[in-house]
Image: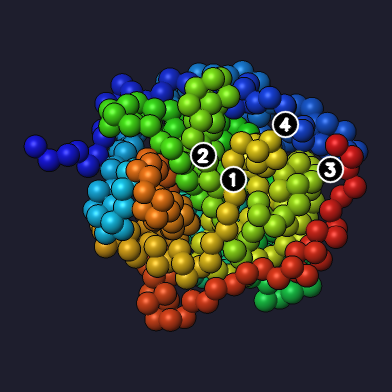
Amino acid sequence: MSEPLKYLLDERDIPNHWYNIAADLPKPPPPPRHPATGAPCTADDLRPLFPDALIAQEMSAEREIAIPGEVRDILRLWRPSPLFRARRLERALDTPARIYYKYEGVSPAGSHKPNTAVPQAYYNKVEGVRRLATETGAGQWGSSLAMACNFFGLECKVFMVKVSFNHKPYRRALMETYGATVTASPSDETASGRSILAADPECPGSLGIAISEAVEVAAAREDTKYALGSVLNHVLLHQTVTGLECFKQMEMAGDEPDVIVGCTGGGSNFAGIAFPYIGRGLRGGRRPRVVAVEPDACPTLTRGRYAYDYGDTAKLTPLVKMHTLGSSFVPPGFHAGGLRYHGMAPLVSHVLDLGLIEAVSVAQLEIFEAGVQFARAEGIVPAPEACHAVAVAMKEALRCKAEGRPQAILFNLCGHGHFDMQAYIDYFGGKLRNYAYPEHEIAMALAGLPSIVD
């Protein structure tokens, strides 16, 4: 009998609860602070942007938070997602490592993002909200929220980072197919967008700028709230269905991960697979090495500063303590659009500060080389963002080969690259270049950090 390549769960195995790592941390994370006063945020401070249920989750220290039945019913469209053993890749690398990947590209939108888009749309609908405003980089989050809003009868307004708006027309078309209105950011539709364009008419945009526009639109109308696809505690909470399913699937495989790898832009898919394992270790269970991977061109964890900063360029959002490159940071237009945010999730930043995870950065050409090798071995073309995890998982497998240690490596393949083929075309055409963000540019962006004493 051939050895199994994939491990499938029944829909009855979709988790009933999300896991909140805040309950198990040895030191609580620093609280968000009001952008005007610097005082810790209250629920009232967050109410103009989010519904009460999500504010409660954002501030919660409960270990488990129940997933509503209406949310689980929609998650059943694609969950539980499959776990694969990458045996063909193992043979191609001639490694004794056992490589597993959790494949989130099976969702209707093609990535892990619907795991939080669906509950966010649900909670807003329950509280009477009629319209959600958001930003998106590569379009994974925008298309996921557009889908979720359609399911719950909500309008959806998306500000898409201009460089991705131009590079990824099919992502834009997918959002519009689900019923969303999509605008290239910075735009002339908001005061924050107009001010950016006045200073730089050719500005390629950034997630920080797009967040400013979405927040401005949400704050201007009583029937509109803001939705974020990463960074915030409640978003990371919703993504833990990934890691919780892995517990059962790795048990089916008769194995346990020694190393867990995830790409990090804002931190949601990384937290989704890693936080349940970190939490189990904090409660006395087995503790794998956990590696967060980011681009050289946006090195938030590896070269940013752990400090209080604004989540957006116009400084409309609460201050959060995170690894940041500065809210004025505008990254180059490299192809991993979902990993271009200037900051990192406060909880991911906190676990790095506590020494519970490692962080590395990789170059653009390396990640595409890894994505192509993975596709030729396993048949799945990864999104450029996911290629970062692929590249480091392969490095870990080759390290196992060099050291003669047959370890188990688990990574999150957070989305497919079907709408990202222009990036692969540019790679094969020799048009892509490596870019390490210059130290003096980082220093300039960090010079404007707010003066907040923790």
Callout 3 secondary element: loop
Is 315 on the left-hand or right-hand side of 451?
A: left
Nearer to us of marks 4 and 1 is 1
Q: Quadrant of residue 349?
A: top right
Q: How is the image coloured?
A: rainbow
44 or 417, which is in the foreground?
A: 417
Name above or below for residue 184 compared with residue 260.
Answer: below
- Pinpoint residue 290: horizontal percent, then vertical percent: 52, 41
Q: Position of residue 354 (x, y in %)?
A: 68, 36
> Which residue sits at x=62%, y=22%?
24
Q: Is residue 190 above or below residue 74?
A: below
Q: Could you give the CA–CA distance between mark 2 and mark 3, rounded to whole angstroms?
A: 36 Å
Mark 3 highlights which residue?
35
Quadrant of the rendering where the C terminus is positioned: top right
The residue positioned 25% from the left and 48% from the top of the image is 87
Residues at badges 2 and 1 in contact (C-beta under 8 Å)? yes
Q: Relative to 71, is 90 on the left or the right?
A: left
Mark 3 or mark 4: whose residue is earlier in sequence: 4
Image point 39% across, 70% down: which residue?
A: 424
Instruction: Tell me whether circle 4 and circle 2 mark residues in contact (CB < 8 Å).
Output: no
Observer-nearest residue: 368 or 58?
368
Q: CA distance from mark 3 to mark 4?
A: 18 Å
Q: Secondary structure at mark 4?
A: loop
Where does residue 2 sit, x and y in percent of width and height? Answer: 12, 40
Q: Residues within 10 Å of mark 4 (few under 14, many from 20)?
A: some
Kindly identify which residue carries mark 2. Answer: 289
> Residue 440 vs residue 209: left or right?
right
User: For the residues marked 4 and 1, what is the alpha-carbon distance in whole angstroms?
Assistant: 18 Å
Amino acid carrying mark 4 in the image: Pro
In this view of the protein, can residue 5 be seen by the observer? yes
The structure residue drawn at horizontal position 43% and vertical position 37%, both measured from the top left corner, is 258
